[in-house]
Amino acid sequence: MMVKVSCARPARLVRHISLATAFGLATAFLGLTPAEAAKTTLSLGMTVEPTGLDPTIAAPVAIGQVTWQNVFEGLVRIDESGKVQPQLAKSWQISPDGLTYTFKLQTGVSFHDGEAFDSAAAKFALDRARGADSVNPQKRFFASIASIDTPDPETLILHLSEPTGSLLYWLGWPASVMVAPNSAADDKTKPVGTGPFKFVNWAKGDKVEFEKNATYWNKAVSPKLDKVTFRFIADPQAQAAALKSGDVDAIPEFGAPELMSSFTDDAKLVTKIGNTELKVVAGMNNAAKPFSDKRVRQALMMAIDRKTVVDGAWSGLGTPIGSHYTPNDPGYIDLTDKLPYDPEKAKALLAEAGYPDGFTFTIKSPQMAYAPRSAQVMQAMLAEIGVTMNIEPTEFPAKWVQDVMKDRNYEMTIVAHAEPMDIDIYARDPYYFNYKNPAFNALMKKVQETTDPAAQAKIYGEAQTILAEDVPALYLFVMPKLGVWDRKLKGLWENEPIPSNVLSGVSWEE
């Protein structure tokens, strides 16, 4: 609709009306307040504060949830459907033998401090990730890169030592983002990337602040937000209160499923239930007795009713799984009936393994809500087969990472593995499960030797079956993505194919 406004004010006087006054007159005429018409700020709540802001040097997913696709970008990116898309590399070619990847890079791209992004910068980032001194949490992603050529600023060539069918997908991860030679050392606390937002401030224990990158290279994705604040609120009740009061505009991963219904009658807010890759598993130390005996692990799995765990831990909002794989992943098989809930058979297996009277052990439980809740439900179920499980609350991430991931000083733990398609963690050595199976390892090698999706799906199916039978971890459920945000906020991802809060497409409806 076209609106015509007439004004009899003298022309000379009109010229002296400030822009702010003119804007106020226009918005008032249209029935909007200036705040409604011009809101370009966002306050986004998160449960866990990141330990740093550089996803290329530390594993906690909260790092990428703040900086990936906001501050930092990769050669490629993962979109909301989980597919690989071009980013700092606008195109690529793969040689027939799968050993040479030639990338053509975007031109005219700079890091936030003005340093140029080109093939030399890309080579620096990849060499840093794959080098002998690398502390990259996904260093294995780059293990097959034998050498890197930069024939000109726009061309990057990767020479591989062996075919790596997942390489492009891995290059889209937070751990693979491009960092600059002059600023990489300080990225942990002052991140400098090529993305749509620039780092402004980190008030530890409270918030991280970004501002719009006014010179962002990708004009097709011009960010609509001028300022973004990530607020860290651990307590779910406090999260709910912050949402209802408007203190935060959105919490894309709300921490309390039992409170989701409390937003139903709030006209300002909308709730979303999406998909994630968060696989809740109770990992066992397969090198320590009694968990070194497969019969014991199988017995514990048969003592657990997964549906009851989902009901008790996450208000029924979750999908039971029988292996380390989600229904979203290619080649998924529902293996929850492989070792179904059967306490009597569980007791018989324990007796066969030499534990007719059960045994006692300790589970290290991080403080995230799903972990102690799941542990308490499991504790009651295991007691029914004579097994006593003591629950030891464990601070996450620092103490948990030290005790479990680094020292492997534990019997059982429980954690949500957030990495997509990470079934290959059971082939890593060392890794906290201490699980060793040459047949499984061979499958993980075989899947990288092909880029054919159907062949890969078949191999992943075989791998799932091995894990469901061997039970190196108790496979419980996949967590949903519980989002709550202002009804006028548009563009937040409802699903989470990779842990993230991508804000480049987020805007406010006027």
Image (spheres, helix red, strand yellow):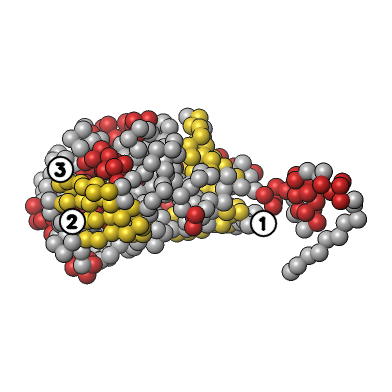
> Does residue 9 appear in this view?
yes
Camera-nearest residue between 420 and 293: 420
Locate residue 17 relative to residue 418 in the image: left or right. Answer: right
Farthest left residue?
438
Residue on which disc 2 sits: 100
Q: Quadrant of residue 137?
A: top left
Element class at badge 1: loop
Q: Can you identify the residue that label 1 sits on?
A: 510
Q: CA distance from mark 3 to mark 2?
A: 27 Å
Give the label on residue 429, or none: 3
Q: Is residue 37 above or below residue 456?
A: above
Q: Residue at x 20, y 67 (%)?
A: 452
Disc 3 marks a residue whose amino acid type is: Asp
Up/down of 186 relative to 413, above or below? above
> How far apart are the alpha carbons under marks 1 and 2?
49 Å
* Mark 3 vs 2, N-terminal side: 2
Please say whether residue 394 is visible from this viewpoint: no
- Amino acid marked by disc 1: Glu
1 or 2: mark nearer the eye: 2
| N-terminal-most mark, 1 or 2 | 2
Secondary structure, mark 3, is: loop
- Please report contact status of discs 3 and 1: CB closer than 8 Å, yes or no: no
Position of residue 57 measured from the top left corner of the image (x, y, whole percent): 31, 36
* Quarter of the N terminus within the rendering: bottom right
Horizontal side of residue 107 vs 156, given as left or right = right
**Label of residue 140 in the image:** none
